[in-house]
Amino acid sequence: MNIIPDSSAWQKLQQHYNRLSQCSIQELFAEDPQRAEKFRLEFFDLFLDYSKNIITEETMRLLIALAQEAGLPEAIEDMFNGEHINATENRAVLHTALRNRSDQPVFVDGADIMPDIEQVLERMAAFCEKVRGGRWLGHSGKPIRDVVNIGIGGSDLGPKMACEALMAFASPNLRVHFVSNVDGFHLAHTLSRLNPEQTLFIVASKTFTTQETMCNADSARQWLLQAFASKEAVGKHFVAVSTNSEAVAKFGIQSDNMFEFWDWVGGRYSMCSAIGLPIMLQIGPEHFFHMLEGFHEMDQHFRNAPLHKNMPVILALLGVWYNNFFGAQSHAILPYEQALHRFPAHLQQVDMESNGKSVDRQGKPVTWQTGAVIWGEPGTNGQHSFFQLLHQGTKLIPADFIAFCRSQTPMGEHQQKLLANFVAQTEALAFGKSNAEVLAENPGISSSLAAQKTFGGNRPSNSIIADELNPRSLGRLMALYEHKVFTQGQIWNIYSFDQWGVQLGKELADKVLAELRGSRPAGGHDSSTNAIIQHLKQRA
Ligand code: F6P
């Protein structure tokens, strides 16, 4: 059922918006000294302050009613119970089973999938111990020092983000690299620093057909064979992570060296599957399992907490509030933690590939806004770049500020300065600085200059804080956003677990490639595309 825009909850929210949009965050705080107490949630060491939003208790009540009307509680159960909620691909959606650390079975089409998951995790752990312990030897008998993960999208972004985030937990004996782009520079530059005798490649691809990944994997194999001139070397220097065992075997990787996952794991939700192999290699099985536990804790919270105390649900509803009522087009993710510098990039795929849809579950064009543009950079760098627009621009950009009480790398006063900026920014965004304050601070200032220096405030943000960045807190944080995306997809009545929008570009690229190669006559496109292809061929 489309609850937008016909449901009573939606209509009440619209009326409520008409009233509340006349209020400011400043006024809401002035009216209610208990505001910070009312709009906060804690879950383990994760602390969410959402009081600096343009909301009242009534707003949250109405948003929760909307989630109820959208059937969110039932939808959550359907996902955890292995229903085929990825309807357009007729698949279950069970990334939650990958990190199910309870002893409860999880069924897909009547079969418990936990034994298979456990078996792959055990194989991964044994493999990682061998590589990390210097017992996995390359073709010339030397231990592995460098691991290159070749993958793209979900087979790259999540593991890369986690490896960066958890660098403090890395083995000093192993360096993990990521090659994703089909631009030859990416692979060539990475390999230029490596010794083939001590390099191990992970070819990570759910389908094992992705053009970029297969092209990079072929070139990496050539590079290896140039050094060894023996096909046997491939077995010692290549492993695969995939659902497609046939294609893996065809590439020359034996089944012993393949780590399996399953079609009920979406690419962008696959970090806890064997796609996490580079993470486990870097931080070791024990820390990897802590990460899974963090994911699992948040999964349980999402499944069991009442909606009004449910962190992913609250974040999702606030997102709907700004997206659909205030007309906000984007949402900024601002981690005040350099190690999380790839976190916004990973969330871009998780969120935008999931909820960037314009057709509802009945196949009809939506008449409401769906997924926001997700973007962001770590603080404090962003402050010296795009924050001007956040503070004084014409656009409303809700933002999540993420920070950790303790630094992974304590050094002098760095952490206090980082946190001071983290706090100051949300305060400045919400409360601004009035024209009167500017005039009082600057006697004799012209009114036009005072206007330039005035901050309107009333710009919403969430503050998300954990004690420290570690495998467990990273797992909780990631699952928080995954379930936020799920919740929004349910409210917008769109399918969040397919990605048909990436297909057309792939098909056309194959056609154009044939034209660039000369194996297909150029032409047959629009005049712009024809001219560009011609130009590229002439100037190659
Ligand atoms: O192009 C989009 C996509 O299908 C993503 O959803 C996926 O994560 C990525 O490509 C990589 O796919 P694969 O793991 O099959 O190579």
Image: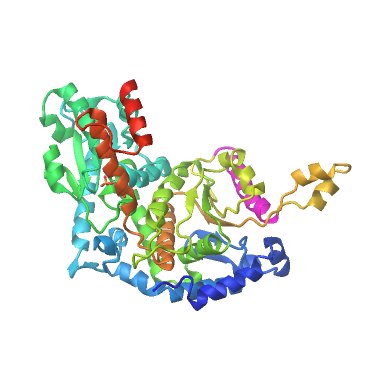
Q: Residue at x 43, y 49 (%)?
A: 348
Q: Is residue 14 above or below residue 91?
A: below
Q: Nearer the viewer, residue 468 or 397?
A: 397
Tell which of 77 and 71 is nearer to you.
71
x 45%, y 60%: residue = 370
Q: Residue placed farthest to the right in the image?
A: 444
Residue 189 point in image, percent of width and height:
34, 26
Q: Position of residue 471 (x, y in %)?
A: 39, 50
Give residue 391's position: percent from left, percent from top: 65, 48
| 463 displayed left or right of 491 | right
Q: Position of residue 33 (x, y in %)?
A: 70, 68
Overall secondary structure of the magenta section: helix
Please state the extent of the stretch shown in magenta in the rendering. 411-431
Does the segment drawn in magenta span residue 415?
A: yes
Asked if one can make out residue 61 in the rendered structure from this viewpoint, the answer is no
Indicate the quadrant containing the N terminus: top left, top right, bottom left or bottom right.
bottom left
Instruction: Tell me if 242 is positioned left or right of 270 in this view.
Output: left
In the rendered image, the quadrant that contains the C terminus is top left
Q: Is 266 in front, or is 418?
A: 266
Q: Residue at x 48, y 75 (%)?
A: 6
